[in-house]
Amino acid sequence: MDTAESMVESLSNISDRCSQVSVVVVSVVTNHKLSSLSIISVHRGRKSIDCGVPTQGLDKDRVTGIFYASDDSSITTGVNFNVSEEYGYSTNLFLPYVLGDVRAFPQGSRNCYSLKPSKAKDNLYLIRASFMYGNYDGKNALPEFDLYLNVNFWSTVKFKNASDQVYKEILSFATSDTTYVCLVNKGKGTPFISGLELRPVNNTIYGTEYGRNVSLVLYQRWDIGYLNGTGRYQNDIYDRIWSPYTPVSWISTKTTEYLDIFQSGYRPPDEVIKTAASPKSGDGPLELVWTSEDPNARFYAFLYFAELEKLEKNDSRKINILWNGSPVSENSFIPSSKYSMTFSNSKAFTGKDHLISVQKTEDSTLPPILNAIEIFTAYSLDEFFTAIKDVNAIESIKATYKVNKIWSGDPCSPRLFPWEGIECVYSNPNYQIKSLNLSSSGIQGPIASAFRNLTLLESLDLSNNDLQQNVPEFLADLKHLKFLNLKGNNFTGFIPKSLMKKLKDGVLALSVDDQNLCNSSSCQDKNNMVVPIVVATSVIFLLVVLVIIWIILRQRKRGANSGPGPLLPTGKRRFTYNEVSSITKNFNKVIGKGAFGIVYLGSLEDGTEIAVKMIKDSSSTRPQGSSSSPAPKEFQVEAELLLTVHHRNIASFVGYCDDDRSMALIYEYMANGNLQDYLSSEKAEDLSWERRLHIAIDSAQGLEYLHNGCMPPIVHRDVKTANILLNDNLEAKIADFGVSKVFPEDDISPVETVVMGTPGYIDPE
Ligand SMILES: *[C@@H]1O[C@H](CO)[C@@H](O)[C@H](O)[C@H]1NC(C)=O
Ligand SMILES: *[C@@H]1O[C@H](CO)[C@@H](O)[C@H](O)[C@H]1NC(C)=O
Ligand SMILES: *[C@@H]1O[C@H](CO)[C@@H](O)[C@H](O)[C@H]1NC(C)=O
């Protein structure tokens, strides 16, 4: 037991020191003996992603033992491929696991992964992207493309040949909980990616004079001296890949003694720090030379030192580091034999030619050594992000309409590659959306309120979609809006007065379907308009009739019956009798008997359940409401009306059939039938008072919409429980417009004296 306890104690010491690792100890103690002990280390915030594999369990790299997950949850675009066989695992047993398959992006100029490691914001991450072309597309053409981290350029990805393994690595502080890795098509071939890895790094290391305003892109990472591994070590907590490097003029040394790597925070793995090199020539310097293509590039070098030899009493090793002849560290130093030390330049190295020289001081008896070095290029994070308000608005629009475009990463930034259909105002410190083109994007439903949050919007093109309901007032609140195209949608009602005013004032160019353009009188009178609903309690309802347009329409249509039916707005459908018959599986299931016909259950090709109300054509006009009287006029009214009415408390209309054989109205299917039946069934016992109240409110809202929301107003004239339908959530919708009346707005003179409605519901007098 003592041993177990002390082991647990020493394990928890380790876990304290490794801030990124939690050590879980699972032990089973039987008869005071430790029978099993295992350690599971969990790396918080790490992500290892294999790009281009379908969702599955984790897969383990046989060399590194790292488990990789599919990229399905971090990206929605792109196409998966395997590399061609000659480059795959079958011919190369040690191919890193992630390089066997790729995700390629033939569509869109910018495709982004969104990575959300836990607690990302404000923490330093090492991000590594890996690529191997492997002739995955069979074209044998090496692509070239750019890589961006969030909105800033990271690197260009190029290949020497199809088996070239390219790794790009960057150290950057996460500015938000989501990190985007974007691939940008430069017109030099389709971008693709093989793997992505995120490793949290201690925030206090790899500092520069620019603090968090730069990212460090890896230029070289060398393990100097002896090497017998892969360059990737399991005990490297940050999972860095160290390339072996020992020029011929250098001589390697190594140690097996313990060296403390925790001291500095950089924590080079044992394999790296326990090997080093010195110049063969004894007194000379260790020199590293490189040339930069960009004379303005800024480099930072991190040099690792530890004494690997047992020094004699009179021996000393003292070191100076110089860059292009000037000292990097103020003082010379003596490498420690107990722990690793890391030195870096406090000011960036700039220019074309670079020479780092590690020298012994005059009074040093031993030559200089170097254990490892990392060289990075600093990239300023000088691109701005889109304002968060605009991002939220456009993300909400994207989600509401399930916009089918390559919309990933930041909407406006980087400037050269904004989202498709978006233009932005590029003013500091945040970019904002000024133009949005969703023309012909297949979007459906009402205009989302999120549009009002795009406050700098100047141009909005929503033409040729299936947008419905009213054109909302709030569009007039967009102060900068100069261009608005709403043509080719299914809006009901008229354009709000406030927008019409902008149009008249010449500040807005508005394109809209004629049916939504108000004529002058309705525009001017809208506010004062009286909805002429006459309710008389002492006399029979005297209802006003003026427009019997539908009769005229009907007559006209009869005259030209051979031609195609009236054009239905997109989404609505006119069906033939044969179609209706097949939709209802030959009128198989009766779900109700309405006032004017039998209602059948049907289902559309996409599986949507619908209710089909059949009405036999008959020229006789019998009294309204008697249960077996089909009436073509009423049918006509209902069909015409339903096409213009959209509200969540009005049964929604799928289409109709009106051919020589029969007439039918097709509605959404309401699973709970009509309220009358529902209330008289056993189910009513479970109907709470709250639910009942909701049903009443729903119905009232439907009626309110008919009276006040529709232009011209509609009076139902046959409101009763049998005409209130309930869906599976027990939400009420008003149906059955068979006897409804449309009130023309500008004339109330003629009087209709026909009694309408269902006996028992109409006024007895
Ligand atoms: C890649 O290869 C694996 C295993 O051979 C296979 O299951 C998978 O379907 C392949 N993927 C593609 C995109 O062809
Ligand atoms: C491909 O390029 C890499 C990197 O330059 C090189 O090591 C390798 O030998 C090349 N392979 C072939 C088949 O040319
Ligand atoms: C929106 O895009 C369509 C093509 O997709 C184009 O015809 C139309 O002119 C664009 N609208 C604006 C305002 O640029």
Image (spheres, helix red, strand yellow):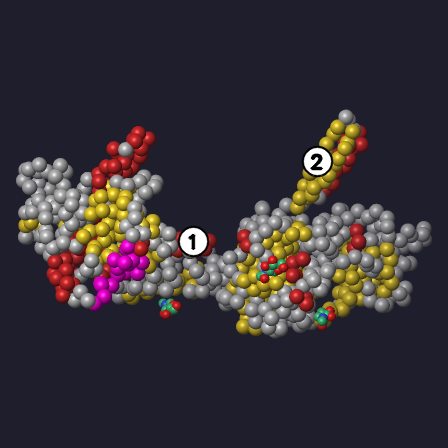
The C terminus, quarter of image:
top left
Going by the picture, which residue comes out furthest to the top?
A: 31
Q: Secondary structure at mark 1?
A: helix
357 vs 454: above or below: below
Mark 1, other Cα within 10 Å: few <14 / some 14–19 / many ≥20: few
Report the image quarter containing ligand 1.
bottom right
Instruction: Find the distance from the CA under tag 2 to the CA under tag 1.
Output: 44 Å
Give the magenta-colored segment's residue range: 563-581
Residue 141, given in percent of the width and then of the height, sits at 61, 73
Residue 92, given in percent of the width and then of the height, sits at 72, 63
In the rendered image, which quarter is residue 248 located in? Answer: bottom right
The residue tagged 2 is 26
Q: Name the residue: 28% across, 41% down.
A: 673
**Label 2 is placed on what type of residue?**
Val
Mark count = 2
Q: Name the residue: 86% across, 60% down.
A: 252
Q: Is mark 2 within 8 Å of ligand 1?
A: no
Residue 131, given in percent of the width and then of the height, sits at 64, 63
Q: Nearer the viewer, residue 287 or 57?
A: 57
